[in-house]
Image (spheres, helix red, strand yellow):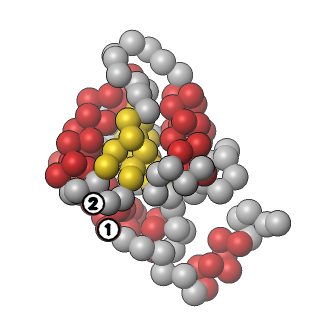
Amino acid sequence: MRRIAIASDHGGLALKEELKRFLADQQMDSIDLGTHAADSVDYPDFAHAVCEEILSCRADAGILVCGTGIGMSIAANRRRGIRAALCTDPYMARMSREHNDANVLCLGERVVGTGLALSIALAFLSSTFAGGRHSRRLAKIDPP
């Protein structure tokens, strides 16, 4: 079973809860790192928590949700070894995995509806890295 670290700020709480149910339906284990209430919180705290789960190999991938997905993607991409992709359709999600080996999906609750978000998540989680010429390009992102 794949383990997916998932978190949101207050702007993404409702979609995060839908995604957790979806992951369970897909036979995937979710690690819910918060937030758990609608009170205002700071998105970088949750982005960094998900990144830590991935970097420590306690999760296979991550999903972050905020109002637009922008803040979460910026915060997550500050961590070396994290490739967070803000996706608004399934094609972007598939390409982020196949070409960029993205390990975090970022979504905006106020940008995509629930049905579309679930389709995006499915595309992201069911795609794999193509390797080949893309590996050479990835090596240029985090040089030694």
Secondary-structure class at tag 2: helix
Whether residues under marks 1 and 2 lie with C-beta atoms below 8 angstroms apart, the answer is: yes
Q: Give the crowd class for mark 2: few <14, some 14-19, many >=20 residues within 10 Å.
A: some
What label does residue 126 carry, if any?
1
Q: Residue at x 60, y 51 (%)?
A: 55
Name of the residue lying farthest toward the bottom:
132
| Amino acid under disc 1 | Ser
Above or below: residue 44 compared with residue 143? above
Taking the image as drawn, is residue 27 in sight? yes
- Please name whichever residue, 93 or 51, is drawn nearer the observer in this view of the structure: 51
Q: Quadrant of the C terminus?
A: bottom right
Residue 27 occupies quadrant: bottom left
Residue 14 occupies quadrant: top left
Secondary-structure class at tag 1: helix
Q: Residue 69's x, y, as percent?
A: 44, 40
Q: Residue at x 52, y 68 (%)?
A: 101
Above or below: residue 43 compared with residue 121? above
Indicate left or right for 77 with 122 as reference: right
Q: Residue 42's x, y, as percent?
A: 53, 22
Q: Residue 127's x, y, as percent?
A: 37, 71
Residue 67 occupies quadrant: top left
Q: Residue at x 54, y 36 (%)?
A: 49
Residue at the spot of label 2: 122
Q: Residue at x 31, y 36 (%)?
A: 16
